[in-house]
Amino acid sequence: MATYLLIRHKVQDFKIWKAAFDAHGPMRTQAGLTENYLLRNSDDPNEVVALFEAIDLARARAFVESTDLRQKMQEAGVLDKPDIYFLND
């Protein structure tokens, strides 16, 4: 059974957010996350949905609960509280 992490949030400016997202890639890799999809809302291009496959649920949970991720999201211009879901197939 595979485990997935889905995150949805709005950002101030997608280009700025995307640069910060890309720069944070090594931390996602360290957390055992593999990006499957990075999507934007067709009606609001500053609303982002990201789907990752997670090797280990505990590591994925630690990543999303980390101070580092909260700080990076704030610096990148995340505007709202992210919706975060852990999913199984």
Image (tube, helix red, strand yellow):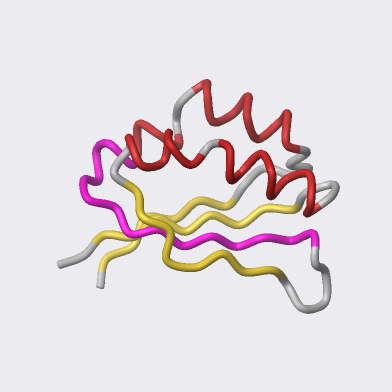
Q: Could you say where residue 59 lies in the image, as x and y percent from the top left? A: 27, 36
20 in relation to 34, above or below: above
Total marks placed: 0
Quarter where residue 29 is shown: top left
* Quarter of the image with the C terminus in it: bottom left
Quarter where residue 36 is shown: bottom left
What segment carries the magenta color? Answer: 46-60
**The stretch drawn in magenta includes residue 26:** no
**The stretch drawn in magenta includes residue 50:** yes
Q: Could you say where residue 69 lies in the image, as x and y percent from the top left? A: 54, 30
Residue at image position (84%, 47%) is 12
42 in relation to 4, above or below: below
Viewer-proximal residue among 46 and 79: 46
Q: Is residue 58 left or right of residue 17?
A: left
Viewer-proximal residue among 82 and 25: 25
47 in relation to 61, above or below: below
Q: Is residue 59 left or right of residue 40?
A: left
Residue at the extreme top: 67
Residue at image position (15%, 67%) is 1
Residue at image position (33%, 42%) is 60
6 in relation to 33, above or below: below
Residue at image position (45%, 30%) is 65
Q: Could you say where residue 18 lies in the image, as x and y percent from the top left? A: 69, 50
Viewer-proximal residue among 72 and 16: 16
Quarter where residue 72 is shown: top right
Residue at the extreme left: 1
Q: Could you say where residue 44 lies in the image, as x and y percent from the top left? A: 82, 69
